[in-house]
Image (cartoon, rainbow, N blue to C red):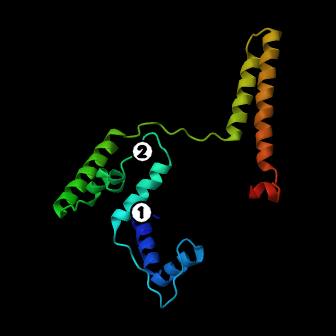
């Protein structure tokens, strides 16, 4: 699912949610006071009272670096998000981002060589080949024993890995 499909999915889902459903959800949580059908909600338009109440609440916290309430409510960086862009400005932003993306893709060309997957059979054949090589060489018995021991350990590790991969798993291990 790409971002556009996800956004369309969210828009479609929200359009199916009715105001009554939202109201009932808030009523069910108990966050807001419950009003009877004939009782109307009165909204206090006096922001100064609310600001003073907030200021008193913040002062009661006795913070060392308390922020100015007016600055908190009307945070300067938030105003920049309300700017309405023209169609041309939007196009300029998008084309600039696409140009940057194309440049970064050109710079990041993957020139690594992908390694081919080596099978267990190939590894076991290589170990057998190494064993034959050491037999053909004129090594002392101590060195030959050291190489035989190392090759034998490698052979056991590869065989164990092969046998472990062939074992049937229990249902619990499969579900983990």
Residue 95 picture quarter:
bottom left
- Image quarter in which the C terminus is found: bottom right
Image side of residue 25 versus residue 53, left or right: right
Foreground label between 1 and 2: 2
Q: Earlier in the sequence, mark 1 or mark 2?
A: 1
Tell me how far mark 1 sits from mark 2, CA to CA.
40 Å
Residue 103 versus residue 29: which sits nearer the camera? 29
Measured along the vertical axis of the image, is residue 153 above or below residue 111? Answer: above
Residue corresponding to mark 2: 66
Instruction: Tell me the SS state at disc 2.
Output: loop
Image side of residue 127 versus residue 96, left or right: right
Residue 149 versus residue 136: which sits nearer the camera? 149
Where is residue 156? Give x, y as percent: 81, 33
Identify the residue at image location x=30%, y=51%. Answer: 77
Residue 64 versus residue 8: which sits nearer the camera? 64
Q: What mark, if any, has residue 61 been given in the picture?
A: none
Residue corresponding to mark 1: 3
Measured along the vertical axis of the image, is residue 83 above or below residue 153? Answer: below
List the single residue furthest toward the bottom.
38
Identify the residue at image location x=44%, y=81%. Answer: 41
Where is residue 17? Give x, y as percent: 47, 80
Identify the residue at image location x=49%, y=50%. Answer: 60
Residue 142 picture quarter:
top right
């Amino acid at each position: 699912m790409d971002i556009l499909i996800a956004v369309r999915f969210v828009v479609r889902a929200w359009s199916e949610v009715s105001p009554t459903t939202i109201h009932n959800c808030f009523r069910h949580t108990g966050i807001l006071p419950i009003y009877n059908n004939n009782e109307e909600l009165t909204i206090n338009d006096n922001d100064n009272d609310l600001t003073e109440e907030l200021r008193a609440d913040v002062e009661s916290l006795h913070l060392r670096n308390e922020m100015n309430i007016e600055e908190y409510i009307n945070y300067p960086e938030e105003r920049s998000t309300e700017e309405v862009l023209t169609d041309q400005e939007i196009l300029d932003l998008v084309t600039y981002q696409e140009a940057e993306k194309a440049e970064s893709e050109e710079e990041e060309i993957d020139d690594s060589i992908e390694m081919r997957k080596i099978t267990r059979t190939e590894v076991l054949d290589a170990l057998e080949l190494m064993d034959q090589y050491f037999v053909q060489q004129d090594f002392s018995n101590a060195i030959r024993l050291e190489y035989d021991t190392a090759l034998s350990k490698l052979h056991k590790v590869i065989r164990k890995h092969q046998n472990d991969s062939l074992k049937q798993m229990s249902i619990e291990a499969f579900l983990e």
